[in-house]
Amino acid sequence: MKVVIEQVSKAYPGRYGRQLCALKDINLTVHDEEFIVLVGPSGCGKSTLLNMVGGLLSPTSGKIYVEGLKDNRDPVIGIVFQDVGLFPWRTVSQNIAFGLEECGLSKQEQRERIEYYVSLVGLEGFENAFPHQLSGGMRQRVGIARALAIQPDLLLMDEPFSALDAQSRMLMQEELLRIWGERRLSTLYVTHNIQEAVYLADRVVVLSRRPGRVISIISIDLPKFGRDKNEYITRFNGYVEQIWRLIRKDAEDALREGE
Ligand SMILES: Nc1ncnc2c1ncn2[C@@H]1O[C@H](COP(=O)(O)OP(=O)(O)OP(=O)(O)O)[C@@H](O)[C@H]1O
């Protein structure tokens, strides 16, 4: 399945009755099994774009549609936000079960599904734990398991690891690639972090400052697995440098203007 974003703009009501143009003329296709990362300076509209793709917001103009789904059904979309939004009164299993209750699965099928995804994200033994008993990284794993358990056609992730400390974040990035490697999905991922973008993406989409426009789309030609080679590090750093050069001026302006 692919997602096509065609000439999409988004304006919010601004101050003094003016419109605030958050995104302008965005064109982008997320191909089947492709991992796309959106990066850009603060306030460039990354979350707005993700939320429109997820159907949580509507574009002011342009359209977003999917192609390649059988029976013209609506796509199933899994979403992971920075603040995972787990139900504190539900255990790990019950949190993962949440989306499944809507899927019309039998109790037995739900149990099997939960068991599979608990194990995929490495949380065996914590099925009956409550969110407050887990570390931030473990809570994110539950969020990922919950999003994947509904077997989505598309995965949307909005800064899922930005509340984690640097080391947990690196481990979760590794974990995400491993999980993604087992169950490849069209994925749209938002981050401020350029290294994270290069690490995860098939393509990095660089957005400009408000109104956000696509200023560059960079294909990351690096192996996703088996990466501990000097050549990999050199090429990785080359991509990071290339993207930082594209963003730096906008990021400085955003910092100066307190966005
Ligand atoms: N509901 C809203 N009403 C008015 N303006 C909004 C609303 N939501 C977002 N904006 C504005 O739209 C612009 C884009 O916001 P958005 O959150 O999509 O950017 P972002 O790139 O995800 O930002 P950040 O990196 O800081 O999370 C910002 O200037 C923001 O202030």
Image (cartoon, rainbow, N blue to C red):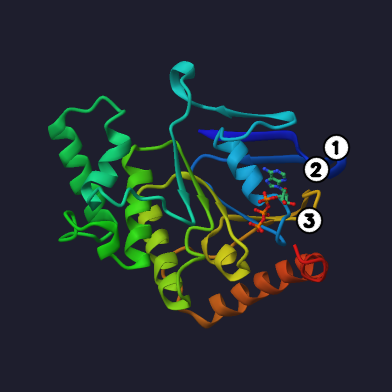
Q: Residues within 10 Å of mark 1 (few under 14, many from 20)?
A: few
Q: Mark 2 points at which residue?
A: 14
Is 18 displayed left or right of 162 in the figure? right
Q: How far apart are marks 2 and 3 (CA)?
A: 20 Å
**Residue 128 x %, y %:** 16, 54
Q: Name the residue under label 3.
A: 208
- Say what secondary structure mark 3 lies in: loop
Q: Distance between the residues labelled 2 and 1?
A: 6 Å
Residue drawn at (78%, 65%) of the image: 254
Q: Mark 1 points at which residue?
A: 17
Please say if 194 is above or below 117: below
Viewport quadrant of the C terminus: bottom right
Q: Quadrant of residue 193?
A: bottom right
State whether label 1 is within 8 Å of ligand 1: no
Is mark 3 in CB contact (under 8 Å) with mark 1? Answer: no
- Give, as a three-letter code, the residue at label 2: Gly
- Give, as a three-letter code, the residue at label 1: Gly
- Say which of 66 and 258 sits in front: 258
Please say if 252 is above or below 128: below
Is 142 displayed left or right of 166 in the figure? left
Residue drawn at (44%, 21%) of the image: 70
Q: Residues within 10 Å of mark 2 (few under 14, many from 20)?
A: few
- Give, as a three-letter code, the residue at label 3: Ser
Is mark 2 in CB contact (under 8 Å) with mark 1? Answer: yes
**Residue 160 x %, y %:** 48, 58
- Say what secondary structure mark 2 lies in: loop
State whether label 2 is within 8 Å of ligand 1: yes
Please say if 144 is above or below 75: below
* Closer mark to the observer between disc 2 and disc 3: 2
**Residue 194 x %, y %:** 63, 68
